[in-house]
Image (spheres, coloured by chain):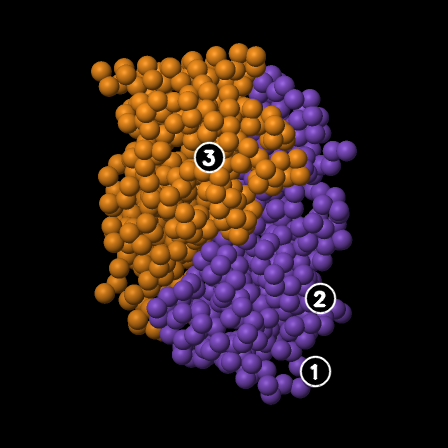
Chain colours: A purple, B orange
Amino acid sequence: MRENLHATYLIHSPADAIGARAQALALEQSIEMPLAALTDARVARDIVAQIESITARGGDLHAVRLALALETVGADAGQLMNILFGNSSLLPDVQLEDVDLSADAAARFGGPALGIAGIRERVRVAERALTCTALKPIGSSVAQVSRLAALFADAGIDVIKDDHGWAESATSPFRVRVPACQRAIAAANRGRSDHESLSQYAPSLSGDLDQMRSQLRCAVDCGVTMALAAPMTMGCSGFQTLRREFPQIALLAHPALAGTQIAPAALLGKLFRLFGADAVIFPNHGGRFAYPRGVCAAIAAGNRAPWLRLKPSLPTPAGGMPVERVAEIVSEYGRDVMLLIGGSLLIAREQLAARSRTFVSAVAQASDAVTA
Amino acid sequence: MRENLHATYLIHSPADAIGARAQALALEQSIEMPLAALTDARVARDIVAQIESITARGGDLHAVRLALALETVGADAGQLMNILFGNSSLLPDVQLEDVDLSADAAARFGGPALGIAGIRERVRVAERALTCTALKPIGSSVAQVSRLAALFADAGIDVIKDDHGWAESATSPFRVRVPACQRAIAAANRGRSDHESLSQYAPSLSGDLDQMRSQLRCAVDCGVTMALAAPMTMGCSGFQTLRREFPQIALLAHPALAGTQIAPAALLGKLFRLFGADAVIFPNHGGRFAYPRGVCAAIAAGNRAPWLRLKPSLPTPAGGMPVERVAEIVSEYGRDVMLLIGGSLLIAREQLAARSRTFVSAVAQASDAVTA
């Protein structure tokens, strides 16, 4: 019995040509050969992608929904990306708009290990929106960056992540930098009462799967509970492997290299969640990037909506958010959100500690307003 | 002493705003924070990306060349992608047009292990253009696909690669399929004289780095000398790791998921070569994809031109090429090329063997014409 997953593509094509375009797409994303060359009835029945619908979307835009054979994917995230969009990513006028699959299929990928509830447990914050900032700039010494980590933790920021540009370097190797930052943050946590939140450190992983695994082991050994990784840079299969091997670690997915013709709502909203991201960082509207408000809302909806029995991912709007926008952001996304603010804190320079506390209290206040 | 690599970006911007855009780009791809927030003189000097030039390209298009600190990259391909274009890939109007680095920096990445000469040695073809085809369709049984491999080898095709959609599946697991195909091809080679070419099999790798490594070991154990992998799907760091661990294997890079705002001439032409692709498959003009002729020429030039003391990669135009275009393709690219033709053979169905021989002889003839 053939099992499918479903993908919707947007194609610009005159109405009289869209049928042929849809058929070409179905072949491109499955058997990669003309149907006329196919001699195997089993492959025709069980493997060739099937056109489920073609819907006009106005102008020459059409949505084509395909049924892709799950048999060709198994439970490998990289192969899912390949079958969804591998070759078609090379076509200039095709966008992957959406993806859907059964809960049974999704269970094979697994989704978040911790989800929003698990992250809340780690930072010991039951209800309010969470705060996140980044250790910058890359190139700082270990002494500098761990001092910064201490300052952010002292200010009560929930998640202190590495900038995603940190990589193995002579000036601050992971094995030196990460334990130092973790010690600084743990020290700040030590003075807190049971009713206060706990700051958590999320170091950035780099290199190939072996190196990331070794970095993550080192991080776990010194008490780290979260980590940052970029699925599109490292490969989605590897991301999924880390997810499986480190179920106790909250994985924050970074969108580096995610600028493709895959709709952000599908990639950051759903696929990253499917592959196991406990939190998904995305460029919020009105910042340094140009994602429209509706796209950001769709990413957050994809992260949090009930979907295939997967745990929800924590949407983490970022990308040049100033502290002044905290109330607006919390009001828009509600409390199940993590606000990532970096540069807008650091710009305060000598007033960095005060500015960080302002960020923390602004998020708390804005969360109360949402509750009310 | 600061060492740099150089990246050129295309940005649409009014002339009076391009300076600010260029500065924003330099920060985005290095310290990810406002310059005004930076307090560390060493980071300002050694880490922040520097604008080398801004060149008007007509209309509102500008080329911005940045010097990116090599210190932030090391020798990791994934981190290079991250620093080149990680965040900026999320910007709708920025394209990475070109990349350049010193020969010393390139040596750390390594480039092709075998290059064109190494591939020629494996297939025992000194001068003519090479032939390549693909085992299709995915979903075929091991018996079917190995029969097809035998047929292609008997026809004298040089490189018989898996379709890139093959992955671990119940109907044809790698450990069964690959030895069977390799045996079929080796059997065809056995009857050949020393003056004849040797057909080689290039199975497709899938999954995470561990799985690919284990697949490749299995392949090597049964005599395979080539393999297919997609750097953008698996992650460039992992591709580089396979390159280092299997220097005797010719790596064919597949362009799956390579549809980004990185110019194909930079990504397929240069970066894949830098990361170690002995051959680079790309969609030729006039086929199922829309790469213009000039882009294809630039990819081939990037693969083969003397560059940083790296071995050349073998350009492999593909993507819906019919046998009828062989003469034109060889005439365009010359003899240091591999023609990948798949569906146009299979469409012959009962005449597949004859059509495959026609392909082989057409490439030989076209190569003679280029020599003359």
Residue at image point 64% right, 67% down: A248
Q: Is residue A167 above or below residue B103?
A: below
- What's the CA distance linking mark 2 and mark 3? 46 Å
Foreground residue among B351 and A107: B351
For this view, does B156 lie left or right of residue A32?
left
Q: Which amino acid does label 3 sit on?
A: Ala
Which residue, given by chain and number where applicable, does mark 3 sit on?
B202
Q: What element carries label 1?
A: loop
Q: Indicate the position of residue B211 as horizontal and vertical percent values.
A: 55, 49
- Proximity of marks 1 and 2: CB atoms separated by less than 8 Å: no
User: Are tags 1 and 3 found on a single chain?
Assistant: no
For this view, does A2 lie left or right of residue B65?
right
- Proximity of marks 1 and 3: CB atoms separated by less than 8 Å: no
Which residue, given by chain and number where applicable, does mark 1 sit on?
A195
| Chain bearing mark 2 | A
Which residue, given by chain and number where applicable, does mark 2 sit on?
A117
The mark total stands at 3
Foreground residue among A252 and B201: B201
- What's the CA distance linking mark 1 and mark 3? 60 Å
Q: What residue type is labelled 2?
A: Ala
